[in-house]
Amino acid sequence: MIDAYEDPGTPDRRGGWHYLWWLVRCQPGRSALGALFASVWMVLLAATPYLMAKAIDEGLEPGDLGMLTLWSAALFLVGAFNAWLSIMRHRTMTRVRMDANFRTVKVVVGHAVRLGAALSRRAGAGEVVTIGVGDVQTIASALTVVGPGVGAIIAYLVVAGLLVSVSPVIAAVVLLGMPVIVGLVGPFLTRLQGAETEYRDRQGVLTARIADLAGGLRVLNGLGGKGLFADAFQRDSRRLREQGYRVGAVTSWVQALGVGLPTLFLAVVTWLAARLAAQGDISIGELVSVYGYVAVLVGPVAFWVECGYMLSRGVVAARRVVRFLNLEPMEDRGTRDAPAEASVLHDPESGVRILPGRLTALAGARPADTAAVLDRVARYTPSTATWGGVPLDEIPLPQIRARILLADHEADVFAGKLREVLTPLRGAGNCATSHNEPAPAKQHHEAPPDAHLTQALHTAAAEDIVQSLPDGLDSPIDANARNLSGGQRQRIRLARALATNPEVLLAIEPTSALDAHTEARVATRLKQARQGRTTVVTTTSPLVLAHADTVIHLVDGKVAATGTHQGLLDYDPAYKALVARDTDTEEAMR
């Protein structure tokens, strides 16, 4: 089975069938062994009626006790050996399925990591969750055809060959029966693929709605939108249920035909054998063997119908995985080096110019406009932005990520100890600093191990969070910090960004969930801690804007005015109207 740290290989992304075949080719030895065990197991099942016929014809009917004992012993040994083969077949196929399961999980997770920030822009959360929860298991189950599926075909052919020695007519009926059954079930399998595809798509949409609901229930309740969202969710849930009924209807026909058609077909074979025995064309022992062969054939024939059902569902699931794997991360064709020293960041689309070494604030009536500017200058979306006159899309992405950090106030927080949540990855965010700026505190060998964390927590006014937790920095934090309040989560996110000590820090609404007193402390400390380093915040809070060296007022995503906070209040009426709602608070804090 694939090791947790083993390279899963390069998946075949040409389609669902190609992906399933790639999973088989990744474990050729185990797949072949599973097919061998299953084939021998099913063939020996067919050998049981043959041995019974011999015991009757050569031992019981002529009264030869020795031959009866010999064939009975052979029957016992074959049965015991077949029981062992059944165990080995099951073990091997379980490993085949688990390998396919884990390998698919690894390629999906690995690709999600490669997509990085582009993941949320290319695929919804519901799509990824549906793949992880349902599609992976469906794909693994589809690989059952590798073992028992191959064994069913071989057993079917062996039984047909044994029947030739009994009656060529019966053998011909058996050989022609399988294509007829497949032809009758085939159209239902095609319909099943279409219905299953639509069901999976609707399921992904509904899963995304559940994730949105779980993350924004408090906001929806505060805005009075919980009822509207519940109504929309109920409608989508009803549509999914109706589509599930359609899938179930087709599935019921497939399963009914999978049981009914083989039984009906083999009843015909039994009737034909009985007529031949009555006419004296075959012996009593041969008639018993035909009954046994018919009983054995029920399994392979019914199983192949079941295999068709599982393969149909597996292909649908594999297509979803392939569609996800075909998503491409942000293209990186950069060949020019980033500016060696702190330089101007310029976004021609909005007209924003971010001067190095200063605290710049972007203020706009629509938060999406200011966030879009930071997305462009951090190169999270395609743009014509430049850094020191060099187009960002011509700079290798690793250089940009190493020196420019975009801190979103809704960024994910992984579960773990608070110390682990705050500690930046080695080499991330601060591995390239301006030559005329001091090195980050954590690079001084004499500094305590937690000195940079303590400083970051102080700047984010988050010391009280550490003090309130039972084990301080070693206290466990839930995924997305759900065991903290909204304001605490925002301060932890800001502290995590500050702990990386990046050359350029771009913070989206870093204080939007804080009360006025805490917000004032964060604004003051942020100005002091980032002195001489490039810092950009998006905000409309006068408590933060008052500390900015430069305030850029955006209207409809374009620069409308630039200056200091007080200067814009004096000569830009639109800016004053934008921040006036907090002016009283600002005066009170002074």
Image (spheres, rainbow, N blue to C red):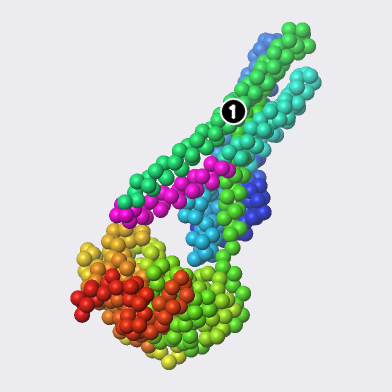
Q: Residue at x 45, y 82 (%)?
A: 354
In this image, 502 relative to 481: left or right?
right
Amino acid type, mark 1: Trp
Rendered-image quadrant of the C terminus:
bottom left
The reply to whether residue 292 is visible in this rendering is no
The magenta region covers 197-223
Magenta stretch: includes residue 276: no
When the figure is inspected, residue 225 is found, relative to residue 427, above or below; the finding is above
Q: Which residue is mark 1?
A: 253
Check disc 1 and report its element: helix, strand or loop: helix
Image quarter of residue 397: bottom right
Main secondary structure along the magenta-highlighted residues: helix
Residue 158 appears at what percent x and percent y?
72, 30
Residue 66 appears at what percent x and percent y?
66, 17
Residue 449 appears at what percent x and percent y?
32, 78
In this image, 521 relative to 426: left or right?
left
Q: Residue at x 61, y 40 (%)?
A: 194
